[in-house]
Amino acid sequence: MSQTTEADIRDALRTVIPDGETQSLIASDRVQGIVVKGGNIGFSIEVDGLSGESIDEVKEKAEKAVSALSGVLSVTCVLTAHKAPATNPESKPASKGPHNSASTQVPKVFERIGAVIAVASGKGGVGKSTVAVNLAISMAQQGKRVGLLDADIYGPSAPQLLNIAGKPDLNDEKKLIPIERHGVFTMSIGYMVSPEQAMIWRGPMVQSALIQMLEDVAWPELDVLILDMPPGTGDIQLTMAQRIPVTGALIVTTPSSLATADVKRAIVMFEKTEIPVFGLVENMAYMNAPDGSKLFPFGQGGAELAEQLGLKHLAALPLDAAVQAASESGVPLSAPENMAAEASETAQAFTDLAATLMRQV
């Protein structure tokens, strides 16, 4: 089976001309963020300026044109707009965040959630999940009702980081009950499958799993829901943009140039989907040497990168052996049960970061 390329997708979309327009979606530069993952295709269409009556039709035509390509298994199209298109007031999504989703299929659970923070990186291996877990616990320790959704379907981290081996129980309505740890209500696909099981799922299955962990889970009323996002800008990110009212995103990176290149792509994705970015967290930024000096094993420049991207530099977290020990034990550094937390500057940095974000949401 031949691999569909971005050029093939663009050629297919050149045939789609919205009603009342004289140029195709490609000629008018409305198509952005094309993602090709095997036979699963994702992209966004900028609909600003199109009439409300034609928007759904444009989406349908675009998906149909790309679906006709050889080798395509699924197509996910996200509609974005700098200004909200005219819609029926009764069809507005139940969103409490500033993100303006073009989809009307926002899960009802968000009626009980005050704010949604997506913790993202664009690249794996930078400690994003560790930051998400410790941030959630730090917020809970400061009096907030917090949920944590491990949205990394292919590589869930919550079971290890929180030392959760059992499966969640069901309530009388046959909904999964979130597992509570350290004052945080948590859910992960990793709670339902064995650690050795490989998640060999196509894009639509991954998207469905994410929505099920929202709709089929008995989430309580929450002040904040933390989304631990997978790396990259693929299926989960497209679903998030289309169906989850994200209040804002937190970007985690290391100072290395390889990581920061992916960060820039992640930021562009959030800009295209109109999700505000709260700022940048520089993880493993330095090491404290025995003589009191600081070593920079992954290079320097986090603050400069944040300034270059027009973002706030929210924290520079050290490369701390206590974090590794906490990850291995399943008792995060921010948890009150962790005896190393009191003497850890990293634990204090998580506390300060949580306080900063709570002021913004």
Image (cartoon, grey):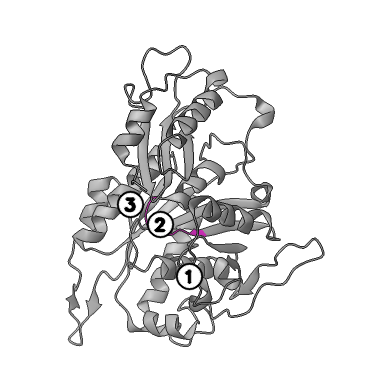
- 3 vs 1, front mark: 1
Tell me which residue sits at (45%, 19%) in the image.
49
Above-or-below relation of 290 to 258:
below
Report, in whole angstroms, how far the alpha carbon at label 2 lies from the one at label 3. 15 Å
Mark 3, residue position: 312
Tell me which residue sits at (37%, 81%) in the image.
324
Disc with the residue nearer the chain's start (2 vs 1): 2
Q: Secondary structure at mark 3?
A: loop
User: Which of the two residues, 191 or 120, is positioned nearer the viewer here?
Assistant: 191
x and y, in percent, of residue 104 in the image: 61, 36
Above-or-below relation of 214 to 293:
above
- Give me the disc on residue 120: 2
Mark 1, residue position: 198
x and y, in percent, of residue 355 in the image: 47, 62
Q: Secondary structure at mark 2?
A: strand
Q: Is residue 80 visible?
A: no
